[in-house]
Structures are given as structure tokens and as C-alpha cells.
Image (tube, helix red, strand yellow):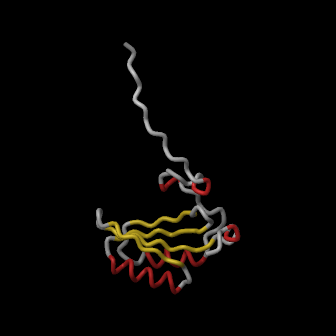
């Protein structure tokens, strides 16, 4: 009697706009192709003055350029968020209660690609 293979459910198709970045580890995310802007450099310099766990930069899937700052201190995240807003950056804070960290995403448009982004 032949052994039957278990059927595995097919993965849902990845939306086209996510196909470049979907499922990639952070080190494989697309980077900006241009020189880093002064605004992003400023928030990186500021964040290095605080007790942070990690910092990284990458390009989002719709042309935004992100600086992600990770810290276990919510006070640090609040201060850096205020600095990012003073620099004109959009910000998003993500709480990771399961591992006791907070992630701050500082977002700036990539001027070369921003015209392609859908209007809000």
C-alpha cells in the first residue's frame, strides 16, 4: 500500500507591493540608494547619546526611509520621538511587551520615490 503524502496548505499569495521585502530578514531589507539625509543622520546621532539596544535604517515598501530605534526604556523612546518630530519626521512607537522592549520608527520620504506613494 503506497504512503500518501500529507497535503500542506498553500501559502497565501504575497501582495505585489510587498513582494520585494516580504519574508526577508532585516539584514536583507532594501537600503536607500542615495546618500543618507541630514535629518536621518541627526536622529541617529541623537539616539547614540541615549541607552538604546539597537538602531538600523532601511527603506520601506512604499518609498519611505525608516530609522528603527530599539530601547528597553520608554522614557528614552519618548525623548527620541520628541526629537524626531522636531526634525519633521513621522513617528510610530511599537510596544513589545513580550520581550520588554520599545521600538521607535522614524519615517522620512525618499524624495526620488515619494511621488509614487498613494495619497492619504
- Pick whichever, 114 or 43, lies toward us: 114
Front residue of 63/35: it is: 63
Residue 90 x, y percent position in the rendering: 53, 78
Q: Which of 8 and 86 is in front in this view?
A: 8
Residue 3: percent from left, percent from top: 38, 19
58 relative to 104 in the view: left or right: right
Residue 43 appears left or right of 116:
left
Q: Could you say where residue 7 lies in the image, as x and y percent from the top left? A: 43, 32
Residue 93 vs 5, above or below: the answer is below
In this view, the residue in front, 28 or 51, is 28
Please identify the quadrant where the C terminus is shown. bottom right
- Residue extending farthest to the bottom is 86
* Outermost residue toward the top in this view: 1
Report the quarter where the N terminus lies: top left
Percent position of residue 49, x then y: 41, 78
Q: Quadrant of residue 64?
A: bottom right
**Looking at the image, which residue is at 55% across and 74% down?**
40
110 shown above or below 22: below
Is 85 rendered above or below residue 51?
below
Q: Which residue is drawn at 61% across and 57% down?
A: 17
Amino acid at each position: 500500500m503506497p504512503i500518501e503524502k500529507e497535503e500542506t496548505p498553500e501559502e497565501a499569495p504575497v501582495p505585489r507591493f510587498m513582494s520585494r521585502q516580504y519574508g526577508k530578514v532585516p539584514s536583507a531589507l532594501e537600503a536607500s540608494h542615495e546618500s543618507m539625509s541630514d535629518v536621518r543622520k541627526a536622529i541617529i546621532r541623537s539616539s547614540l547619546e541615549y541607552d538604546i539596544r539597537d538602531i538600523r535604517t532601511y527603506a520601506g515598501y512604499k518609498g519611505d526611509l525608516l530609522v528603527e530605534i530599539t530601547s528597553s526604556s520608554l522614557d528614552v523612546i519618548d525623548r527620541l520621538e520628541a526629537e524626531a518630530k522636531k526634525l519633521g519626521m513621522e513617528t510610530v512607537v511599537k510596544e513589545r511587551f513580550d520581550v520588554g522592549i520599545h521600538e521607535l520608527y522614524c519615517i522620512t520620504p525618499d524624495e526620488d520615490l515619494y511621488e509614487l506613494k498613494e495619497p492619504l
